[in-house]
Amino acid sequence: MNNDEIKKNTKKNIVKAEKINKSFQSGHGVLEVLKGASIELHEGEIVLLLGASGSGKSTLLHILGTLDKPDSGSILYDEVDVNALKHNALAKFRNEKIGFVYQFHHLLPDFNALENVMLPGLIMGLPRENAAEKALELLKAVGLEDRDTHKPNQLSGGEAQRVAVARALFNKPKVVYADEPTGNLDNKTGTALLELFLELNERFGQTFFIATHNERLMEQIKLRYLIKDGIITNNS
Ligand SMILES: Nc1ncnc2c1ncn2[C@@H]1O[C@H](COP(=O)(O)OP(=O)(O)OP(=O)(O)O)[C@@H](O)[C@H]1O
Ligand SMILES: [Mg+2]
């Protein structure tokens, strides 16, 4: 293979985190959660993050998703060093480039499904009408176009989670982090949500990094990393 061929066969790198350290102060002293954790995610990949409860999965996802800062280590998105971005620039970067799906959906209770999905667009300054149109398309993609006027408390758990996925996709982020997105759902609903991730990945080519214990997903997705003792190893 010549250099050009090698390049063509190498998937584009989306995020590269190196030697991430993170400790928390607790009543029992310093708790070292991440101790030099490194990982690379590439364009279009679906990657699982496995690890015991308390091993640092949420901590890692929050740090990669720029919702929290590491004590040390670097996080590069396409050569952008997110640790160096100031508050406003970082918020803008996160809104445009990163989608986040939490274990509990974290939708805003006073806004209906459509409005919740529109929010990342409104924050970016998109006119309301355009944002609404795009949000409706996304609701359609997750099978919920007829739930647009429902407030979160008028949605089932699985529906609320699908709205949260639609919101995470609004700005066509390069990467979507999902923190045990099915942890709170029954098996069937959880499986349906995971099928949706697979479908959206096919359709929109986004990278998904998913912390999960879901066995069905573990059967289907072979690219896996394990977090243990503060470091990440390839567990594929
Ligand atoms: N803000 C904090 N202050 C102190 N300790 C924290 C804080 N956040 C997390 N921890 C501790 O860090 C460790 C890792 O937490 P984390 O939430 O990342 O685990 P997890 O792998 O996501 O677990 P689970 O599977 O239960 O969600 C835990 O032992 C937790 O108690
Ligand atoms: Mg967690």
Image (cartoon, grey):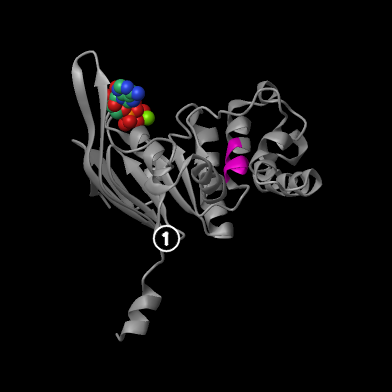
- Residue drawn at the location 65% of the way across and 46% of the way down: 124
Up-down relation of residue 135 to residue 180 (above or below): below
| Amino acid carrying mark 1 in the image | Asp
- Residue drawn at the location 66% of the way across and 48% of the way down: 141
Pick the front one: 202 or 72: 72
Up-down relation of residue 137 to residue 228 (above or below): below
Queried whether the magenta region covers residue 16, the answer comes back as no
Horizontal and vertical percent position of residue 176: 49, 47
Magenta part of the protein: which range?
Answer: 164-168
Q: Quadrant of residue 143?
A: top right
Pointer 1 local density, CA inside 10 Å: few below 14, some 14–19, many at least 20: few
Q: Residue furthest bottom?
A: 2
Horizontal and vertical percent position of residue 163: 63, 36
- Residue on which disc 1 sits: 78
Q: Quadrant of residue 64?
A: top left
Question: Predominant secondary structure in magenta?
Answer: helix
